Amino acid sequence: MKTLLYCLFILASFVSCTAQKQPKKPNIIFVFSDDQRFNSLSMTGDTVTETPNIDQLAKEGVFFNNAYITSPICGPSRANIFTAQWERRNKIGFTNISKHVISDETYQNSWQAQLKKAGYSTAFIGKHHTKIGDKKDTPLVENTDFSYYGNGHLGFYPAKKHKQFNNLKNKTQVEGLLEATKAFLSQDNAYEYFFENADPSIKNQLTKRDPNKPFSAWINLNLPHASSIGGMGSKPEDPDYYKTKYNDVKHKIVLPVGYPQAISLPEEVYATKDLMKYYVTSNKGKLLNDKLKMDRAVYAIDLMIGELRNFLKEIGEAENTIIVFCSDNGLFLGEHGLGGKTILYDESVHVPMIVYSPFFKDKTKGKVVNELVVGQDIPATIIEMCGLDVPETYQGKSMLPLIEGKNENWREDIFLENLFTDQGYPRQEGVRSKKFKYIRSFSKANDRNKYIPEQTIETNEQPIYEELFDIINDPTEQNNLATNPLYQEQLIHYRHRCNKLVKELF
């Protein structure tokens, strides 16, 4: 008996030691900005904005030079991240016309729900723009440890629109969401006020991370979106950079070549009268002022990234935390005569994307990947980096092979789509490779108050307008080659390719 007990003691000691030596799963922080253009960073060519912290993140991580959002508008782009699917498959539209929500079953396959099941403490913070399960987002709230968000636009001062943000000491959006993130991550009493003063409606959904578990935090900003720059710097307590930053260099703000441009699309596709008021770019003074405020917002986001990394060091988690940075879509600032997004030109779909990991080897740090990646690839990448199996429902692919230099069998083109037909936008489908961009637009007159993702598959509907651009020689997509006889072979190829992709992704 003594021998048996001794053997059991030795076995238990061995198991205990083995468990202690087993490496902890990596933490995840995903920062998702809003309407942030690809060229909004110092490193991507912005002539005014200073982004040393984001640039440094890229130098220590991997920067994706050809990252795209395939449904470039708030709700669908976020639904695509939740589901890791194209909108054509998940059918999560931007307005109630679509009458679709992310089902509980689909949500359980989302990357954060998968991490929760794998033993992670999870947080969802900031802007939320798509329903999950029901009007109360029940699956999201019940399966997230720290659920602190506002539906729709947050505004520059979030508490003005959403009472749940009233417990923040920082009243400005970026600083407030950083404060909330610290409250989730901290283990001391410095943020007890945050929990004690939380609105009664959300008190039961705010729990600090469990220090014995890895954590995952999804931080959703609503800046530099034009809806959230109003009032910037108007309160005495606002940080000075929201009031005076870049005043001395605002003459360096660059407007599009040939500004002001007429809208490059025929009126039956899209017209000036269709533009939302805060997206009109024909007023030069207003456009320059908006750009200045957006630059200040990007600067604030950059400061947030720097402060977040410093905080991770303070709490001893920096060496185990992966950080992913991306934007939900790009933005027109006068290019093609447009403001806003949704139209499938590169200013709208091309975004900055960075994956940083403290576990990257030296040869990986600072790497620039030129392969075509999409927002839907982020969930699969996070899942794989955490050592989990990627759900079969995902259409996006893990980018780890690209990070590791294994580019074999990667996609050669991407399918782009706009199914949002309110506000005068045309339903569009497109294909972008590294060489060409093809876009086809359908009749907006026939599409009002409709959500019809199956239309071109079931009816073989023909577009009313086609565009083809030589991306290499015409990166700003100014010269439409669709009617050029010299490019008919390429036009036919991309028509067929678009037909094939839309069916594959449905």
Image (cartoon, grey):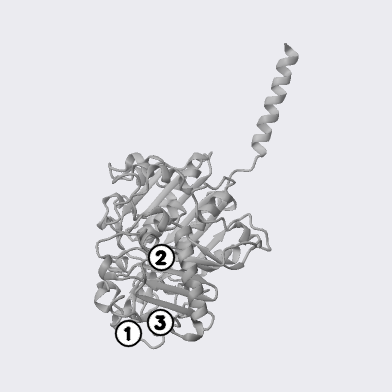
Q: CA distance from mark 3 to mark 2?
A: 31 Å
- For label 3, the crowd category at 10 Å Cα-Cα, with few meaning under 14, some 14 to 19 and many 20 or more, is some
Name which residue type carries label 1: Ala
Q: Residue at x 33, y 86 (%)?
A: 260
N-terminal-most mark, 1 or 2: 1
Q: Nearer the viewer, mark 1 or mark 3?
A: 1
- For label 2, the crowd category at 10 Å Cα-Cα, with few meaning under 14, some 14 to 19 and many 20 or more, is many
Q: CA distance from mark 1 to mark 2?
A: 23 Å
Name which residue type carries label 3: Ile
Q: Is residue 467 above or below residue 461?
A: below
What secondary structure is found at the residue carrying circle 3? Answer: loop
N-terminal-most mark, 3 or 2: 3
Q: Is residue 211 above or below residue 53?
A: above
Q: Is residue 68 visible?
A: no
Question: Which residue bears the numbered disc 1?
Answer: 262
Judge by depth and name the residue closer to the eye, 356 or 199: 356
* Rendered-image quadrant of the C terminus: bottom left
On the picture, is 176 further left or further right than 50?
A: left
> Residue 182's x, y, as percent?
44, 51
Question: Which residue bears the numbered disc 3?
Answer: 253
